[in-house]
Amino acid sequence: MHAEATSDKVSMGWYLDGRATCVFGTHTHIQTADERVLLKGTAYISDLGMTGPYDGVLGRKKERVLQAMITGMPIYFDVATGDLRVLGAIVTADSQSGRATAIERVSVSISEAEAYPKEAPAEPPEPAADAESL
C-alpha cells in the first residue's frame, strides 16, 4: 500500500488481516522496524524501504536537497550515489491456508562496483537453430 501516513497503512493491515497473506507499505523510502504477523495470519510492515543510494536524502544528493530546504527555492534533485542498498521483506506462508507464518526484514548492501560495472554486460547467447519452430 502506497500511503503517506503510517496510520493509514496500519489500519489497512488490520482491515486485511486474515484476508491477505501480506500487506506491505511504501512511500517514505525508510524501512520501518514494525514487521509482524497479525493475529489472523497477515504479514505486515509499514514501509519496505527503498532500493538505491542511502548517502543522500531519499535517494537524492543531500547537498541539493539541503540547498532547497535552506533557500526555499526550487532546484533539481540529482540522484545520489553511495551506500547502495536493497531493502524489503521475506514472508513465509502456509501453502494450504495462505496465512503468513513469518516475516523478516531484509537489508543488503551493494558495492558501487557491483551496481555500476565498468564492463558492459555480456551479450545474450544466440537462440538455438530450431528456436523459430517453437
Image (cartoon, helix red, strand yellow):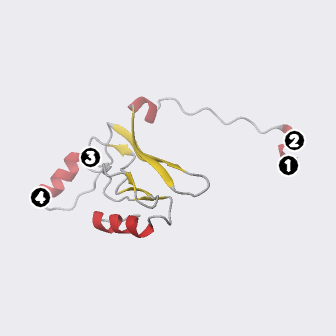
Specify the label residue 130 is tagged with. 2
Can residue 116 be seen by looking at this rendering? no
- According to the picture, the residue beneath numbered tag 4 turns out to be 71
In this view, the mark in front (2 or 4)? 2
- According to the picture, the residue beneath numbered tag 1 turns out to be 134
**Disc 1 residue type?**
Leu
- According to the picture, the residue beneath numbered tag 3 turns out to be 61
Percent position (x, y) of residue 45?
Answer: 37, 55
Can residue 60 be seen by looking at this rendering? yes
Percent position (x, y) of residue 102?
Answer: 45, 47
Q: Mark 2 or mark 4, which has the lower sequence index?
A: 4
Q: Mark 3 or mark 4, which has the lower sequence index?
A: 3
- Circles 3 and 1: CB distance less than 8 Å? no
Which residue shows up at 37% across the image and 58% down it? 26
- Circles 2 and 1: CB distance less than 8 Å? yes
Q: Is residue 48 left or right of residue 62?
A: right
**Mark 1 closeness class: few <14, some 14–19, many ≥20 residues within 10 Å:** few
What whole-number distance in Å separates the C-alpha atoms at marks 2 and 1?
7 Å
